[in-house]
Amino acid sequence: MANIFDYLDWRGDLSLNQAEFNEIDNLILARFSYFPFDNIIKENETITIEEAGKRFENLDVTKEKILQKEDADLFPAMAKSNRFSKMKITNYINKINVIEEKQFSAITIFLPDDTIYVSFRGTDNTLIGWKEDFNMSFREQVPSQVDAVVYLNEVASKYPKLLRVGGHSKGGNMAVYAASFCNEEIKNRIINVYNNDGPGFHEVVIASTEYQNMLPKVHTYVPQTSIIGRLLYHEENYTVVQSAQNGVMQHDVYTWQLQGEKFIHLDEVDDGSKFMDKTIKEWLNEVSKEQRGEFINHVFEILQATDADTLAKMKENWVKNARVLICTYKNMDEESKKMMTQTIEALFVIIKNNIKEKLKLSERKQDIK
């Protein structure tokens, strides 16, 4: 089986002028935005990926906030390939705002075919980043989506070229949102929008004319047991990609399988993905937006009591942090604890009922045989 590293070995010697842009190139550029460029590229500076790679080599990798160990291999591989090395990058932005509950990052990439790929970063390992993700379950829009529209408008106005817009995870969500709600003139220049296993949207967004009109340009890819990419509400068609992992680990793009310049496509998502999709949607219908918001706020209040601002720091002092979490929960008022218990119970009741339904369906199929 092959992944994006195999693709770079196979296709890395050919520029986009020799072999046109494809869905694998999209995934690589979507993942590219996860790299911590803060110490590599200056504000409004434009450099090649090759130059950025050289600067990276001079950094102490252990001090850089690399989200996945594979990222540290992908970046140099891109910098040394004919296909990606001469691409120019610019307009890197990375904003974390605890008060606004916002984690937003993006980078613009100039392609040899005279187009631009605007890449939005997905969720990093900050608690604020995860909090913003969960806020999507009860808010029509979150701050990063607003920033994504502003960013796309500014970049597209600055560089009057045809556009590709993409991202992975929350980045895919922002790509679709930004493309849907950017200025009309810019929408007309968008070639394609790539959503790589990104969560869906609030019902209000789904029903909007802007979202509906952008759907023909949206390409959504999800692994066979997609969980993140099936959250909330979607209306776009999607392509199912084979992954070498199981469950939620399939969200990792390095596990996505490909052959040549295409993903290995499957006919549909598996039963696990369908089960999660059905369960989450029923929970969203069962629990009001107000209750969801209150529940999520309380959960993150408990997590933030540890003073850890990233998941990594939470794990570092797990025993100490576990005590803090338990103590913080015990000190909450009874009404809040009751609300949290009811919200969790509602989810478990739905899970239990769906398991029963699934078992009954399986028994019927056995009887038919």
Image (spheres, rainbow, N blue to C red):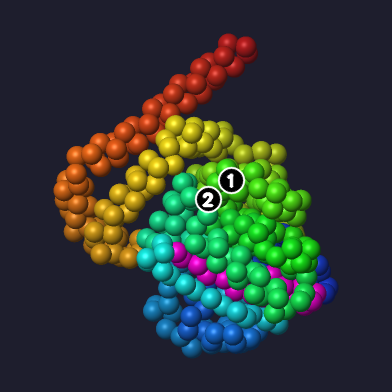
The answer to which of 194 and 145 lies nearer the viewer is 145
Q: How many marks?
A: 2
Residue 31 location in percent, x, y? 58, 65
Q: Which residues are magenta?
A: 102-117
234 relative to 313, above or below: above
As for residue 24 lying within the magenta part, the answer is: no
Observer able to see residue 224: no
Q: Residue at x 46, y 54 (%)?
A: 133
Q: Secondary structure at mark 1?
A: helix
Q: Which residue is mark 2?
A: 140
Q: Secondary structure at mark 2?
A: loop
Residue 39 location in percent, x, y? 48, 84
Q: Residues within 10 Å of mark 2 (few under 14, many from 20)?
A: few
Amino acid type of the residue that numbered disc 2 sits on in the rendered structure: Glu
- In the picture, measured across the screen, residue 132 lies left or right of residue 330, that is right
333 relative to 173, above or below: above
